[in-house]
Structures are given as C-alpha cells and as structure tokens.
Image: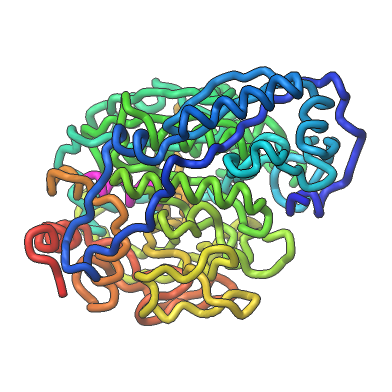
Amino acid sequence: MHPATRQAIRKAPAAPSEMLEITLLLRPRTALPELEHPLATGSGQRHHLTHAEMASRHGAHPHDLDLVRAFATDHQLHIGEIDLARRTVQLTGTISSIAEAFHTSLHHHTCTYTDHDESTFLSPATEPAIPPSLRHLVEAVLGLHTRPTARRHRTILAAPTHQPHSLRQLANAYDLPAQANCSTQTIGLIELGGGFHPHDINAFCQANHLPTPRISVVEVHGGRNAPAPTAAIQHMLDCINGQIKLSDDALQSTSIEAAQATVEVTMDLAILAGLAPGAHLVLYFGTADEQGIYHALSRAIYDQTHRPDVLSISWGEAEPALSEAYLFAIDRLLLAASHLGITVCASSGDAGAHNNSPDHLPAVNFPASSPYCLACGGTNAHLKISAPTSDAAEIMEEVAWNSTHFGFKGATGGGVSRYFPLPPWQQRAHVPRSPFNKPGRGVPDVAGPADPRCGFEILMAGRSFTSAGTSAVAPLWAALLAHCNQSLGHRCGHIHDHLYHIGHHQLAGLRPVTTGHNDVYQAGPGWNPCTGFGTPSGKHLQLYLHTAATKPCP
C-alpha cells in the first residue's frame, strides 16, 4: 500500500467508467552504471554522455513495445505518447479496465496529515501487480496514485525584521560572480503549480538595472503557467505585512495557495535573473502528483531543444510519504542527469529535521536526498552593509536557519536518508545513522541564506517584499554553478566529489557554518546535517574547479 494511503480516509470506490491515464516506465537497453568518482580515479573530470548516446545505449528497446501493445489490446487500453529515450509509454483506459489489468481496485481518499490541500485523490486499495507478460520489462507504473507528492514551502509568510538585502549585496557577501555573463548557459526550473507574470519579471529587472532574461515555458502533462491574479497576490502580501489577519483555514485556501505558488516561481526567476545574468531560463511546468513530476523532470533532463546545463528544484516531500516505485523512478532520472552532465540543485526543505513526516520521526526531503542531487540547506546570515545604498556586503555571522516569526516556524531540512545508502563521497563525512540506526545518505551537502526575516527583496504585483527559504538556496547554487560552467567551458555535472574534497580539506571554496540546529541535529565543524559543508565562496570555488580540471587534487 502507498505510504500516504495509510494516513488517508478511504471514500467511495472510483466510478468504473471514469477515465485514467497512467505511465509505464520501461527497462533500459542496458542499465546506467554508477558514477565514477574522478578524484578517486585520479582524474579531475568525468566523461559525460550525449543525449544521442544516452538514448541509444540506455533508452527503451523498440521490441519491448510489442509486448506493451499486446497487453494494451488485451485490456482495452489506448496507447498514447511513446518516448523511447525517456523509456515511457502512456496508457489510457477506464478505471475498471486499468484495475483489472493490474489486479487491484481504485478508491478515492482524503488525507490531511500534511499542509497540502484537503483534496480527494485516487489510490489503489492493494499493491498493484504487474502482469507476468510485462514483469521483466516494466520498472514502475505511475499514475495509479494521484495525491500531490511535492510540498510548497510556507516560509515566505513572514514579514522581515531587518532591512531586506538586494541580490547584489548577497552576491558580494558570498563572492558570487554575478556581474559576469552566463550567455552560454541554460538553467531549467521544475515548477509544480502557480506561474509568473512577465511584467513582474520586467519590473524587477528594471528596478535592479538588470537585463531581462530570455525565458521559455515548457508545459508538460497537464502542467501550465497559471499565475495567480494580481489581486490575490496583493491579498497574500497584505497578510505577510500584518495588514490583515487570516485564519489557518484561510491560509490554506486555494487562492492563497495559488498566490504563494506564483511567488515561488517568480522568486526563482528573480534570483536567476539577478545572479546569472544572460542565462536562458526554461520553466518546466508539471502537475504535483507522481506521474506529473516524473514527466516534468524527465522532459527537462532529456530536452534536446533547450538542453539545460543546470536544474533547480524548490519542492520536495519527506521520504516516508513516498512510494518506493516513485523514489526509484525519480532517482534513476537523476542518475541519468548526472551522466549527461546536468547538475541538479534541490531544496532540503523548510520544516526542520522532522520535515512534516507522516510517522513524526526525523525524515529528509526527497528529491534532495537522492545522491545525484546537490542538497541545499539553509542559514540565517547577518550581513554588514557599508552604507544603506551600497552593494558592498560581508558576512558577520551565519548560523543554521531555525526561527519562528509571527507564528510561522521555519528551519533548514537535514538529516539521514532511510532509503539511500551512504554514497562513496560521504564515507569520511561522519554522517550519523538514520532514525532506524542504519547508515544512509546525509542531507544537505551545502547551504545558503534562507531565513526570510532577513531575506532578499523582490518586486511583484506592484509591491516590494522579501522572500527566502531553502527554495531560494537551490536557484542560488544553480546560478553559481552556471557561472562555473561558463568559466570552465564545460559542465561541472555531479560536483559532490569536489565539494567534499573542499570541505574535508577546509579549502576556501566553502564557508563552514558550525552553530545552530534544526530541532534534532546540531551544526558543527566538518559536514553536519543542518548546513552540510557550508555556504559558497563563489570565486574561490571557481578557482578550485579550474585547478582541478587541469591538475587533479590528490
């Protein structure tokens, strides 16, 4: 049974004639190998596959489609989109046909254990069975469970207590090369709700003397750029600024949810416009269920039109709320991204070590917990600004982010994976054991400024306000790595070996954050489950990567 269904209330059976679309994930021709570790092999760089090589070596085999077609015909299912490179086949049929085909029954449920809307979702009553004819070639069936599988962060619902920072001040404090041009780089953003108004981006760029970025929109599997109306955004901002008081129920209304999702998307674009000027920004809009997320992420990774160099993901969910099939499917996608040289930066979550887990035990955020993601945690940074109108800034103090303001609690996510084993590059990191006393992948890897009380200034819906959260740290790191790619002339790709080398040897590319906690774990020297190896010192990181590319570190 899907983990979320255990926490749900079963409602009525789904109507037999109701139509449903599902996705079969087919086996690859040959399985993707695990990543080689360049520092362990004496090389400073990793060979990356081209999209053509990925499709020909590791895509689905056309012969497997014959068995899928026969299965579909036998069960009165219609075959939709087929993508051999992404290894996906979409099937559509009635609930009764699909339930019979996978030997289960489908019911509507409601679940309120997280801060998602209390909406009805579809889920199988028993674990679906892949028929014998397909068992050897189908790795996962997505779409039988339709509950949202990605959390929207709520940390923006807090008014600032300090003078907000400009992106240029943050860039200077963290020594980011924001004045350099990223014209050769494409940064992809996976968005699962909301949207953006182009006039908001134009206004932000004009106010900050920035070039307006080139933005492309890719709408995937029912996802779309659907920004909230300006009036709804202003209503939410009035709440942030304390001008109106809303009940908890009102804060979870569809209107406020849509406004917050729109702020999230607009914030991503503003950060990247400010910190990676010249980069082509591509937004992949998908739906927030397992099937929708898989299609949005796979479309971005295998996109041969836009070919993103870096991906930023500002959403996630606690591992115990997710099915193993979904965890496996997304993790394999992220492995493919690493082989293609795409760096994937993901938010570690904004709800501390417990991360709103359904079992109330510490749990890390997925997909940040995948070893193929750069997991981005959060800090509270106090900057020294030389003058009110100056861009010059330096970090005076930085601690792990954990704060409550106006009744809203936010803290950096971090801890130990229950699903993913300890990766090779964390063997020396002294990662603690999981809540079940097993070794596992430690989260996060790195960190950045996340406390919204002293966040950075955004212009939207004609209003100026501040925002942050770890959902802001992922695009910040994406911007920095786009600069690194541009400077090096090639993709950094899976960069963990280098970052952990910097951290272990206390080199200048990362700034340790050694104080604070996330309710369970303490920050401290070396790697820690609150801030990883710390926040960036951008130009030093670039210099290290240039040296490693020509003279590998021992």
Given the current orientation, which residue lies at the most extreme right position? 12
User: What residue is drawn where x is 82% and y is 46%?
Assistant: 126
Residue 237 visible in image: no
Q: Position of residue 402 (x, y in %)?
A: 53, 66
User: In the image, what residue occupies the spot 23% across and 55% down?
Assistant: 46
Asked if 231 appears above or below 55 in the picture, the reply is: above
Is residue 464 shown left or right of residue 241?
left
Residue 480 inside the magenta-drawn segment? yes
| Quadrant of the image occupied by residue 108 | top right
Q: Which residues are magenta?
A: 474-482
- Report x, y in % for residue 539: 16, 57
- Please give the name of the residue rendered at 60% of the width and 34% of the height, measured from the top-left corner: 24
What percent of the width, then of the height, locates residue 452?
48, 53
Give how far across and how far down residue 377 sits, in percent.
44, 61
The residue nearer to you, when weighing 418 against 248, is: 418
The image quadrant of residue 136 is top right
Q: Report the side of 271 relative to 244 (left or right).
A: left
Magenta-colored stretch includes residue 161: no
The color scheme shown is rainbow
Q: Is residue 392 left or right of residue 99?
A: left
Nearer to me, 444 or 470: 444
Tell me, yes or no, if residue 543 can be seen here: yes
Residue in the foreground of this view, choosing between 343 and 358: 343
Main SS category, magenta section: helix
Residue at image location 66% in from the left, 24% down from the top? 70
Q: Quadrant of the C terminus?
A: bottom left
Horizontal side of residue 242 vs 471, given as left or right: right
How many marks can you see?
A: 0
